């Protein structure tokens, strides 16, 4: 019997050695140690042996079972390890491969211009405030010295949502809001950038939606020369240090006196070109001294306090600065247009 066990062991070890996958190992297991194996039938015959023989054969059978089990286990482990290694090898990532180029976006030209203007005014101590795009008739017109019947409302024919609420036609509504808010805190100076809306037929220079920056300074002893100095700085910063500005008398119901401001043409050096339409000057914004009625409406005594205000169109500045001939380019999201402002590989 001992020899038979020894023979089983040798056969099993040889066969296990030849196994190349899990199925073969499992088959070998049942063939050599399973219920119907020769090993099991030898074990069954042990009952007839003497006690002495039983001890000897029992020890041998244990040894053979252990050896075969261990051989099966280690074979199975090496097959699994090999499979894992093969998989790792196949899935290997080549870190030396060049990566895909990622396209990096850039700021929209209107954002760039807005931020440039904000930076300038922040450096002069202005606050930057935000206001609602849907505002009341009261804030957009009434408080700004534009009663319901005022003909100047026609120029800003607007998107009404209810009788009283509308999409703001200018950021000047923020003059009212910020004066009411700052009645206690005088003096103050702020700018308010934001979107504005007017019922307009869209073409190369008109858009029903555009953006403005409102500027407002209120305090004691504020004069027109403060306004002029501020806007001169603005024009030089945005269009070049050699620029000059000129004030043309104009009319806005909420400022008195009111002006349109022109900047000397940066394109032709005032010789006359198609940008300045041969005049040497380009109109850039509207401004004036805050009307006493507006100050009064908002709780300021015009005998004591004065202020200046201005409103500049961001699209207009961006069009001039970057030579954009069609305002619609800013909104149509055409990649070919926006790419001109790309930082590329910066
Ligand atoms: N709100 C005016 C406009 O939209 C501009 C403006 C602002 C004029 C402030 C004077 C003072 O045309």
Image (tube, rainbow, N blue to C red):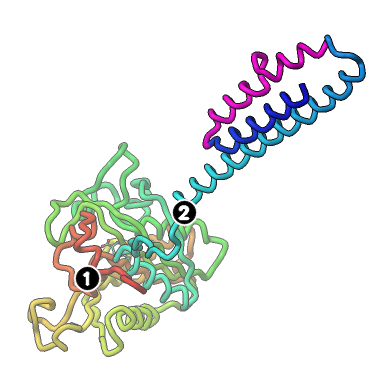
Q: Nearer the viewer, mark 2 or mark 1?
A: 2
Q: Nearer the viewer, residue 21 or 59?
A: 59
Q: Residue 147's x, y, as percent?
A: 29, 50
Q: Quadrant of the C terminus?
A: bottom left
State the residue position of label 1.
Answer: 250
Q: Is residue 133 above or below residue 222?
A: above
Residue extending furthest top?
48
Marks 2 and 1 sit apart, C-alpha to C-alpha, by 74 Å
Residue in the image at 61% along x and 22% along y: 31
State the residue position of label 2.
Answer: 92
Q: Residue 154's x, y, as percent?
A: 19, 52
Mark found first going from the N terminus, 2 or 1? 2
Q: Nearer the viewer, residue 100 or 115?
A: 100
Badge 2 density bin: few <14, some 14–19, many ≥20, Cα 10 Å: few
Q: Nearer the viewer, residue 301 or 191?
A: 191
Task: Judge whether residue 303 can be spotted in this image.
Answer: no
Is residue 109 located in the magenta-colored stretch of the structure? no
Q: Which residues are magenta?
A: 20-47
Magenta-drawn stretch, dominant element (helix, strand or loop): helix
Is residue 37 located in the magenta-colored stretch of the structure? yes
Instruction: Find residue 328 and report its image quarter.
Output: bottom left
Q: Nearer the viewer, residue 123 or 186?
A: 123
């Amino acid at each position: 019997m001992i020899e038979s066990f020894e023979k089983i062991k040798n056969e099993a070890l040889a066969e296990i050695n030849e196994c190349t996958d899990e199925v073969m190992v499992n088959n070998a297991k049942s063939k050599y140690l399973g219920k119907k194996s020769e090993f099991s039938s030898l074990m069954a015959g042990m009952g007839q042996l003497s006690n002495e023989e039983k001890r000897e054969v029992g020890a041998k059978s244990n040894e053979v079972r252990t050896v075969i089990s261990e051989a099966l286990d280690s074979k199975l482990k090496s097959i699994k390890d090999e499979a894992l290694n093969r998989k790792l090898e196949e899935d290997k990532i080549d870190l030396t491969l060049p990566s895909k180029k990622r396209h990096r976006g850039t700021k929209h030209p209107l954002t760039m211009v807005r931020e440039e203007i904000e930076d300038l005014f922040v450096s002069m101590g202005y606050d930057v405030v935000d206001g609602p795009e849907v505002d009341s008739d009261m804030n957009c017109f009434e408080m700004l010295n534009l009663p319901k019947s005022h003909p100047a409302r026609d120029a800003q024919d607007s998107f009404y949502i209810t009788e009283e609420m509308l999409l703001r036609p200018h950021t000047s509504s923020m003059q009212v809001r910020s004066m009411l808010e700052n009645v206690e805190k005088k003096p103050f100076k702020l700018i308010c950038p934001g979107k504005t809306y007017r019922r307009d037929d869209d073409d190369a220079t008109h858009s029903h939606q555009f953006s403005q920056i409102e500027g407002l300074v209120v305090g004691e002893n504020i004069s027109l020369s403060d306004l002029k100095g501020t806007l001169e700085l603005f024009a030089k910063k945005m269009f070049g240090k050699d620029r000059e500005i000129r004030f043309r008398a104009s009319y806005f119901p909420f400022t008195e006196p009111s002006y349109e401001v022109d900047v000397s043409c940066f394109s032709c050096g005032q010789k006359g070109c198609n940008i300045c339409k041969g005049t040497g000057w380009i109109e850039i914004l509207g401004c004036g001294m805050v009307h006493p009625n507006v100050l009064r409406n908002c709780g300021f005594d015009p005998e004591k306090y004065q202020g200046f205000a201005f409103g500049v169109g961001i699209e207009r500045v961006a069009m001039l600065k970057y030579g954009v001939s069609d305002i619609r380019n800013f909104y149509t999201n055409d990649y070919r247009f926006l790419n001109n402002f790309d930082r590329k590989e910066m």
